[in-house]
């Protein structure tokens, strides 16, 4: 047998039959790029199969979380609005209870609290023109509205804090018995009725212990 013929026969025996794919282990493959590509394709196929399931679970869980948070936010906002509305009413009530207004505007003090002409003057006098508006100094209830020989036309307002504010010598009265007034409510006008020597407002502040100096009482509420 010729040498060349023997070599050709050996090569023929080593080669796989036509149509038969050679099966090789990864370490038998000379081209490493081929192995890497094969593994990536296999991993991608498995990931693609899992994605629809994981996306579906995430969507359901995410939807539940969003619904829960939306409900909590809605409840929180509703509660906040209710508290805010109630708080606003309470603030207005507190502000009204503590509000103050001057009894008469642009009027000078003509006589103070104390002894005068041999008798006690229990009020503070403000000189003003007849018809000048008079105002409630604070929130309260009208407990007297009418005529008195000494005070003439006069009004008494009992405040929530207990003091009674007296307005004397009025030319007109604009409130009635049991009316509720706020600080700044117009109650009448300056006059010269009753025992009076000229147009003025006679203002008294009465407590359970008796009359007190209106000037000090008014100053305390202005500050």
Image (cartoon, grey):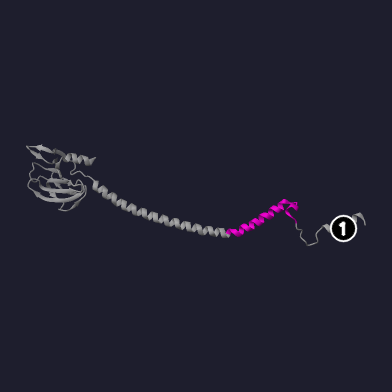
Q: Is residue 77 magenta?
A: no
Q: Could you say which quadrant of the image residue 220 lies in?
A: top left
The residue identified by callout 1 is: 9
Q: Quadrant of the N terminus?
A: bottom right
Of residues 219 and 187, the one drawn nearer to the viewer in this rendering: 219
Residue 187 in percent (x, y) is at: 17, 49
Residue 128, how many percent across, how many down?
Answer: 14, 42
Residue 65 seen from this side:
yes
What residue is at 58 percent from the left and 58 percent from the top? 51
Question: At numbered mark 1, what does the secondary structure look like: helix, strand or loop?
Answer: helix
Describe residue 78's horizontal placement relative to residue 178 as left or right: right
Q: Residue at x 53, y 59 (%)?
A: 57
Q: Nearer the viewer, residue 151 or 104?
A: 151
List x then y, in percent, for residue 134: 17, 46
Count of numbered circles in the view: 1
- Relative to 210, is 70 above or below? below
Single out the residue that lies furthest toward the bottom.
19
Looking at the image, which residue sits at the far right?
A: 1
What secondary structure is the magenta-colored segment mainly? helix
Q: Residue at x 90, y 55 (%)?
A: 4
Q: Quadrant of the C terminus?
A: top left
Using the rendered image of the protein, determine whether residue 128 is visible from the camera's viewpoint: no
Q: Residue placed at 87% from the left, 58% from the top?
A: 9
Label 1 neighbour load within 10 Å: few <14, some 14-19, many 20+: few
The magenta segment is: 24-51
Q: Position of residue 91 (x, y in %)?
A: 29, 49
Nearer to me, 151 or 107: 151
């Amino acid at each position: 047998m010729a040498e060349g013929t023997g070599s050709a026969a050996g090569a023929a025996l080593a080669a796989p039959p036509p149509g038969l794919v050679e099966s090789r282990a990864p370490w038998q493959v000379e081209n490493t790029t081929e192995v890497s590509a094969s593994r990536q394709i296999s991993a991608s196929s498995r990931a693609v199969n899992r994605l629809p399931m994981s996306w579906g679970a995430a969507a359901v869980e995410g939807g539940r979380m969003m619904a829960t948070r939306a409900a909590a936010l809605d409840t929180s906002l509703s509660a906040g609005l209710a508290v805010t509305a109630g708080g606003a009413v309470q603030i207005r009530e507190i502000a009204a209870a503590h509000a103050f207004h001057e009894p008469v505007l642009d009027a000078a003090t003509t006589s103070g609290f104390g002894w005068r002409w041999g008798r006690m003057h229990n009020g503070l006098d403000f000189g003003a023109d007849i018809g000048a508006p008079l105002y409630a100094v604070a929130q309260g209830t009208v407990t007297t509205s009418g005529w008195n020989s000494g005070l003439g036309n006069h009004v008494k307002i009992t405040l929530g804090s207990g003091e009674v504010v007296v307005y004397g010598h009025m030319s007109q009265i604009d409130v009635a018995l049991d009316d509720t007034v706020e600080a700044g409510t117009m109650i009448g006008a300056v006059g010269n009725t009753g025992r009076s020597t000229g147009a003025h407002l006679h203002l008294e502040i009465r407590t359970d212990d008796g009359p007190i100096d209106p000037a000090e009482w008014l100053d305390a509420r202005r500050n």
